[in-house]
Amino acid sequence: MRALLALLGLACWVVAAPHELGSTQAFWNSSLTPQQLRRAVVHEGDGVALHKLFVKLASGKPVIVNAIGGSVSTGHGVGRPALIYSRLVFDYIAARFPNPGHRYINGAAAGTGAAYFASCLDAHVAKNADLVLVEFGVNPSPLDGLEGITRRLLRRGLLDPDVPLLVFVQWCDNWPLAQDRNNPTHWPDRAVMWPGPPLEWVYTARDAEPTINTLATYYNFVSISMRSALLHEVLRGVRPYTFADFGNAGDAIHPNAFGHRHMADAVIGLLERSWHHGGAYAALEQPVDPGWLPPPLVKGNDIEHRIFSCNVSNHDAIKLREVMKNAADWRLEEGQKPGLWGNVSGSHADLTVAVPPPIAAEPGSAEALTVFYLKSWHEEMGTVELTCLSPCTCPATVIDGHGGMASVTEVATVQIVAEGECALRLTVQRGAFKLIGLALSRRGGG
């Protein structure tokens, strides 16, 4: 029975009473080998946040497990939410340390990279999350966005002794060298996609993993790589660790339930190993300097980036509805990528965002309006012009929603000058356009 559950990608754990710190009784059977589990952890950090998490669990307190990421984290290709890797990690914790107060939050958004979450993190991550699982290995995520997420999460720990355990879990797409990425109509079937060991899995041009690993060592968080865990078996064609085992037919990006089981086990393997060596982390109760962050790698990330509003679509597009003023020829769409849709040439949507007054201690501060929109290879997608209505001012900006090889959330940033509120107008120039959300922020001057 246990073997059957493993093949279905289901977790299989032994459930018993909680143990003292450092207990060695098995609670879990891994789908990965001991060698793969060790290869998976690219950077473990110093163990401080791990120790804090285990002290809280061992004391019988409830914890919050919160996931963010793209379509891999939403469970695309898995079939059931219960089989998503982050849910499996939560189920393990709930079995290992039973408490009815444990909470699981999946704040992932399909086709979305780090730049979006850097601006709208609070809409997806609970303020008091204890374990934050982050997955951005597939969707393009530049350094500034990834560092923005990292600094905002770690900054919470500077104000709260319960520093969240930040774990980046990196999946990677499975595109072989022969794939025609720029023409989706030429995407071959599974037999052609996986003719043998694709060396491109070692590294792809849009891969965020090297950047994430650099940030992990710089900011001292946990980085887990499924490429590192599985690469040797993939190249040698060792079953059950090939694309045919953990991939989806006709889908070279998303892992199936067995792949999610691998992802979960890589995280659980780290937690188990750390738990068994819990006594070794006792001396790490406090960081050397809990109020310190290293200087940023991206210019501007050292300036406090204060988010005032994040009106984003979330399943029912309620937040966008709050700022809509006039959009007669546009419509709110629900579904996997909800948003405000317009496809009538010349039609416009008017929206208004509140702008807080400047603070005297912030001379030279500037408001930044971040526009989140759908960018897709579909031929129907086109352009809009963004303008500001008096007395709010901003440069007229054309936003193109067509391009790329998938349908993803893209970001455009416009500097605005406004007091009290800013009225915006989106006018369709050609084709169709979908607005996913708006965020308003201010970077302090100096």
Image (spheres, rainbow, N blue to C red):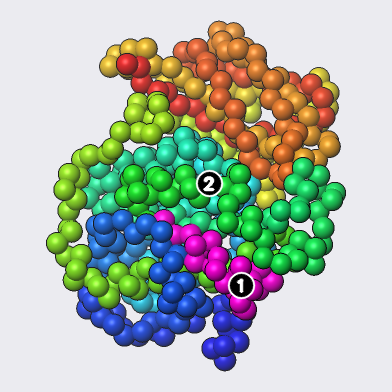
The residue positioned 62% from the left and 24% from the top of the image is 351
Q: Give the residue number, with chain letter if any, for mark 2.
A: 208
Residue type (three-letter) at the residue carrying disc 1: Arg
Q: CA distance from mark 2 to mark 1?
A: 25 Å
Q: Secondary structure at mark 1?
A: helix
Q: Is residue 319 above or below residue 360?
A: below
Instruction: Check the image and name the residue furthest to the left.
Output: 283
Q: Residues within 10 Å of mark 1 (few under 14, many from 20)?
A: few
The residue positioned 18% from the left and 71% from the top of the image is 279
* Quarter residue 383 falls in: top right
Evaluate whether residue 262 shows in this view. yes
Q: Does the magenta portion include 422?
A: no
Kindly identify which numbered label has been placed on residue 236.
1
Horizontal arrangement in the rendering, residue 91 relative to residue 400 (left or right): left
* Quarter residue 40 falls in: bottom left
Are the residues flagged by discs 2 and 1 in contact, CB closer than 8 Å?
no
Residue 26 vs residue 191, the one in the foreground = 191
The residue positioned 63% from the left and 64% from the top of the image is 255
Instruction: Check the image and name the residue furthest to the top.
Output: 391
Q: Is residue 299 above or below residue 272?
A: above
Horizontal and vertical percent position of residue 162: 26, 53
Horizontal and vertical percent position of residue 15: 39, 84
Residue 420 vs residue 26, the one in the foreground = 26
Kindly identify which numbered label has been placed on residue 51.
none
The kind of secondary structure the magenta stretch mainly shows is helix
Horizontal arrangement in the rendering, residue 305 relative to residue 316 (left or right): left
The boundaries of the magenta stretch are 223-246
The residue positioned 53% from the left and 61% from the top of the image is 227
Query: Which is more N-terminal, label 1 or label 2?
Result: 2
Horizontal and vertical percent position of residue 446: 32, 16
Residue type (three-letter) at the residue carrying disc 2: Ala
